[in-house]
Image (cartoon, coloured by chain):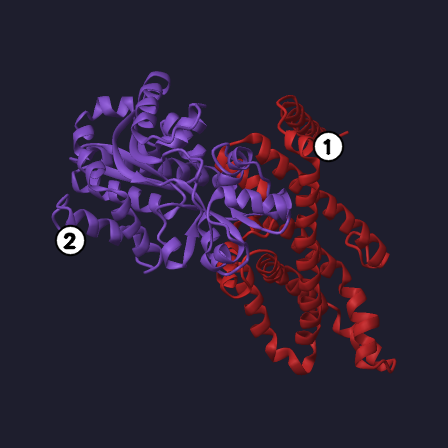
Amino acid sequence: MNANKIIAFAFKGIFWLLIAYFFFWAISNGYFGFIFDQTEEFLSLLRQHLLLVGLSSLLALLIAIPVGVFVTRPQFKKTEWFFMNAANLGQTLPTIAILALIMSYLGIGYQSAVFALTVFSILPILRNTVAGINSVDAEVIDSATGMGLTPFQILYKVELPNASYPIIAGIRTAIVMNVGAAALAYLVGGGGLGDLIFTGIVLRSNEYLLSGAVPVTLLAILIDQLLRLMERVIVPRSLRPGSGS
Amino acid sequence: MKKMMTALSATALLALAACGNGESEAGSDSKGDIVVGGKNFTEQYVLAKITSIYLQENGYNVEEAVNMGSEVVREALENEQVDLYWEYTGTALVNYLGQEPLSEDEEAYEVVKDMDLEENQIVWLDMADVNNTYTLMMRQEDSDKMGIHSMTDLASFINENPDELTFASDAEFATRSDGLPGAEEHYGFEFGSNNVNRMDAGLTYQALRDGDVAVSMGFATDSRIKGFDLLNLEDDEDFFPAYNGAVTVREEILEEHPELEELLQPLAKSIDTETMTEMNYQVDIEQRNESEVAREWLVENGLINKE
């Protein structure tokens, strides 16, 4: 074992100890009380949170990937700057500002929150889709053309599989950020675990704060792991980084 | 190594610059630094602005720390991060001092004044005649249609038609014992957690106006009640305590600046429920800037000179 490995190992150990200590501290102070005392309400908030994240992520996917494919077609390449800038704007605008703006049209609650989260999630997916498709080797496409594949077949059989790793990485980034951003839905009455976090902040109550914040964190980690798993299933082995290809 | 030296010297420079700033501020001929705190709704923005502009014009170096929840700003005061802010008797009585609510304003004021000084070294300056009590609101037309005019009416309606009405609340009211849980217990009804929509405090009025909810919490001095054609349900059993505003300040700060007490007296004397509602109206309905409204009020009342 060399020095670097020992240091990394030590850091990992300290990290896990800190996490264990955190949970010990929180549990012994009853800071997850809300989850156990009002389980039903907690589960309903969790459900709302998942619904917010799920629907907005799905919408973002359905918009970003087709748009990403569209702007990488040679004949539409000129539109790329427009869509990229629009998506950039969607992410640069603070989520709170999007919420406030859209609320005047969609009213208070669920729809506004889903809309804002969708807008917020489009960029990482779109950016990675475009970058992924653009990075596919031109010679690979040439040879596919030479083999007589139609443009659609090239997209489906060559470009998308070759770009799948960055695309899924973008989806992962988007959804994990979305889990955190969904906590802001409280501000417009969108429900979700943000209710607990904000209650904890205004009342300065660790019980509410941690009963909301820790599940949100765990949810983000869990979803990240699930998507990594999906990545293993979808991305061809030879295209994974570090595969030596 | 060279990189590290650069980084170090940059840090040192920054640190020096920061010190320099601090010195120049303290070195100016101001009467001292005051941090004015505030909570997260219109009236508090206006009150904090009035207070900070007034103190600034009187030669203090003022820093503002607003937009906090009740518990947070109070803790900031106790932790010396905030020097003074406008607090309400009812909030302090029930939430910080753990007493039973009192609906008589003078009585509530005397209790919090004595207890807070003794227990927390916090001084309550003169009480203003502005009672910003919590209220439950409905749309005028709904209230007529359903025959709900008081909280007793609301309780019996909900008991007969559970799950029919939805409620908009901010996180604070939904959890405070002098808020929704207390009112539900006192009047004997329950919205049910699925019918309570929690959102940012300022949005509840809009949610009610737009028909997103049937009932909403609000503050009695809020001009949108009138502006949006809403109705305050009568608190017919006097559940909500009196929430008279007064500046709370740390005893230590008052010892450093004893003149503050007298200086701030005219503010408490001149602000009442009517003027407060009017100022809230200008900010919320006429969309004016709160510092403009605050300055104008100070000038009108002869408390500061220049425009």
Give, as a three-letter code, the residue at label 2: Glu
Q: Position of residue A130 (x, y in %)?
A: 67, 68
Q: Is residue A143 visible?
A: no
Specify whether B155 is left or right of B80. Answer: right
Q: Position of residue A232 (x, y in %)?
A: 83, 53
Looking at this view, is A102 or A170 the one in front? A102
Vertical placement of residue B6 versus B164, above or below? above
Per the rendering, the colour in which chain A appears is red
Per the rendering, the colour in which chain B appears is purple
Vertical placement of residue B103 versus A75, above or below? above
Q: Which mark is residue A136?
A: none
Q: Which mark is residue B307?
A: 2
Q: Position of residue A35 (x, y in %)?
A: 67, 34
Classed neighbour count for the residue bearing mark 1: other residues with Cα under 10 Å, few (<14), some (14–19), many (≥20): few
Locate residue B98: give its quadrant. top left
Q: Is residue B279 visible?
A: yes
Locate residue B93: give its quadrant. top left
Specify whether A149 is left or right of B121. Answer: right
Q: How many marks?
A: 2
- Seen as rendered, the residue at the extreme right is A147
Give, as a three-letter code, the residue at label 1: Lys
Chain bearing tag 2 is B
Looking at this view, is B160 or B241 the one in front? B160
Looking at this view, is A40 or B103 the one in front? B103
Q: According to the image, label 1 marks what residue?
A: A5
Q: Tell me the element at label 1.
A: helix
